[in-house]
Each structure stands twice: as C-alpha cells, then as structure tokens.
Image (cartoon, rainbow, N blue to C red):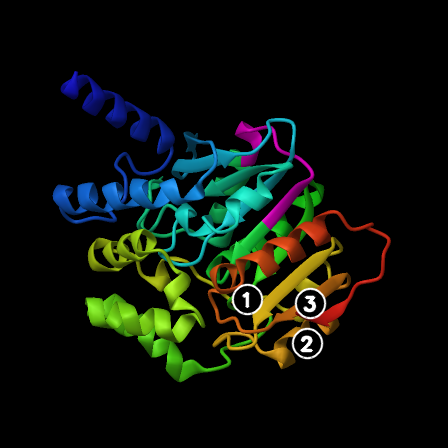
Amino acid sequence: MRYLLILLTFIVLSTGCASRQKAEYQVFCKPQEKTDYLRAYDTALELWDIPYEQKDVITSYGIAHVVVSGPENGEPIVLFHGMDASATMWYPNAKALSREHRVYAIDFPLEAGKSVACSSQLSEDHIVTFYNEIFDHFKLNHIVLIGASRGGWMATNIALLSGTRIKKLVLLSPAQTIGGLKSPLKVLAAIKLKLFPSRKRLANFFDTFSTHPEKIDTRYKEQFYLANLYGNSKPEYIKMLRFSQKKLRTLKIPVLILAGDHDIVNDQAALDKAHRLFPDVETVMVKDAGHFLSIDQSIVINQKILDFLNKDPHAQPEISAF
C-alpha cells in the first residue's frame, strides 16, 4: 500500500507539471522536516472549529491544496494567506465567513503548506493561471477575494487579470499594493526569523506584527515557527512589483481595505491614498490592531467583511475607523 501511494503521488505530480518540470519544487530539504511541519499544520487546522474538507487540485503549475468549508450553495469566498502563514491562518475568521458563504482557503505552492509547485518561480501570469484553474475546477464565478499582507497583493493581481468572475475584493493590510512600508526597520523582525529562526525571534516577530500576540494560539505559532525553521521559501520567488496607479484605476469592482492602527505596513496616509487609486473603495482603520489584524481584532474584522459583502453595490463607499 505504501509503494502504491508513492506511485500515485508521482503520477499526480507528473500530470500537474505535464508541460513544465516533471518533479515538484522541494520546500522542505528533509522528509522528517516535512513530516513534522505537516503534523503541526493538521493540528493548527483543527482550530477552524467547523466542518471542512481538504482537496487537492491539479493545475498547470502544480497541485493546489484547498481547505473548503461552508454551505455548498453559498457564494464563493477565496482566501489568500500571508507569507509562510498557510491556509490555517484564517482560523479566527473561517467560522464567521463560512456561515453563509462557501470558503476556499488555498496554500501558496512555493512555501510551507500542502500545495506543491512545479517550478521555483512563478510570474504574475503564472500566478493568475494557477488560481484561475482552481476557480475553473470548482466552477466558481462572482467570487469574493480576501487577501492578507502578501495575499492582498495576490488577490489584487488576480482581480486585475481575471475579468468579470471577481465580484468584490477585501484587502487586509496588503503589501506592495497601496504604498511602501510604514515602519521598514520593524520588518527586520521577520527577516531575522527567516534567516536565523529561533523561539526568541519567533516571540519578537509576533510582538512586532501583532498587538495581541497572546491571542495567537500556540498550535498556530508552532506551525508558523516550523514554516520558518524548515521551509525553504524566499520573497524573490514571486516578483511582487507594485501596481501602477493607472492599472489600479481600472479595477471597477467594490474594494474594502482594512489596516491596523499599529500596523507596520499601511497607515492612515496609505488608506487615504487608496481613495485616489481605486474607483470604488471603502477603508477602515481598525483600532488596537497590528499587521495581524485578522487575529488581533477578529470579531471586528469578521463583521466589517460580512457587512461589506452584504452591502448594496450602489451604496456610497465609506471611510471609517473602528
């Protein structure tokens, strides 16, 4: 049975990479490291606290691992996690979002998670193809995209290049989307954790990126630590070029952008700028929240997202603080 599973895995990977490389990109250097990480992933996923399914979808650029929850006939929401965070990061939000919507949380394939890539680099076009093939597999249309940090850039890129199938866009402190970094020096906490992972640097990272690190479950912290300790992911694997103002102004769908008042990436000036860049945008500065605002203030974030999804599309956009 074991050898049959190995053979089937090889066949699936070869099929998914049919016109590209024949073997997957290795995020983990050693089998035991991958085993330890995946065990931590499964433990963290239990935090979703709702029924869910894990599905693998073959694409032209690898195998996409998708965590699916919510009613089958619900309008689709697709979640894009931050760097090294994986689909499990949405555990404070999944239950609320899945109440009336069908939620699809996808692991990015070039870093720690359960998705598998065929190459060590993906261009903007490759990324869009990867995700649109997932949308095609599940027959998704009128989709809401929700992205956090790097995932916000991803979601914006897909919304710009995927035509009318995207209905609304929600960005939680998106990186490289509105502007630069509010506090560049504080990003060193992430760089140090990536280059020299340790428990002490992990604690410093969460203290820097979150206003309430005590709210972050220890099971998720362990998974995130192993992602940095074992996962061979690097930012340059994706060419995250900043969008031009001209390009962002072509995005006609409703957009909601949220940032924390203690965020190290986006500040109030960035949110003000968003109103000059996006034709139909609502912005919210969330009080007592950092870059991990979906965890720091999950109740507020969940409600603001649901209010936005249920909002009359002809209503006037808002600027608010909560």
Q: Which amino acid type is marked by label 2?
A: Lys
Determine the image quadrant of residue 1.
Answer: top left
Residue 313 visible in the displayed image: yes
Q: Residue at x 40, y 37 (%)?
A: 65
Residue 166 position, x and y percent, is: 67, 44
Front one among 166 and 97: 97
Crowding around mark 3 (Cα neighbors within 10 Å: few <14, some 14 to 19, many 20+) is: many
Q: Residue at x 65, y 54 (%)?
A: 303
The disc placed on residue 85 is none
State which region is magenta: 135-145
> The C terminus is located in which quarter?
bottom right
Q: Which amino acid type is marked by label 3?
A: Thr
Q: Which amino acid type is marked by label 1?
A: Ser
- Residue assigned mark 3: 283
28 left or right of 258?
left
Front one among 250 and 105: 105
Query: Mark 2 or mark 3, which is nearer to you?
Result: 3
- Residue assigned mark 1: 173
Contact check, label 2 and label 3, Cβ < 8 Å: no
182 left or right of 195?
right
Label 3 secondary element = strand
- Residue 223 against residue 196 in the figure, above or below: above
Q: Earlier in the sequence, mark 3 or mark 1?
A: 1
- Residue assigned mark 2: 273
Crowding around mark 1 (Cα neighbors within 10 Å: few <14, some 14 to 19, many 20+) is: many
Q: Earlier in the sequence, mark 2 or mark 3?
A: 2
- Residue 10 against residue 291 in the figure, above or below: above
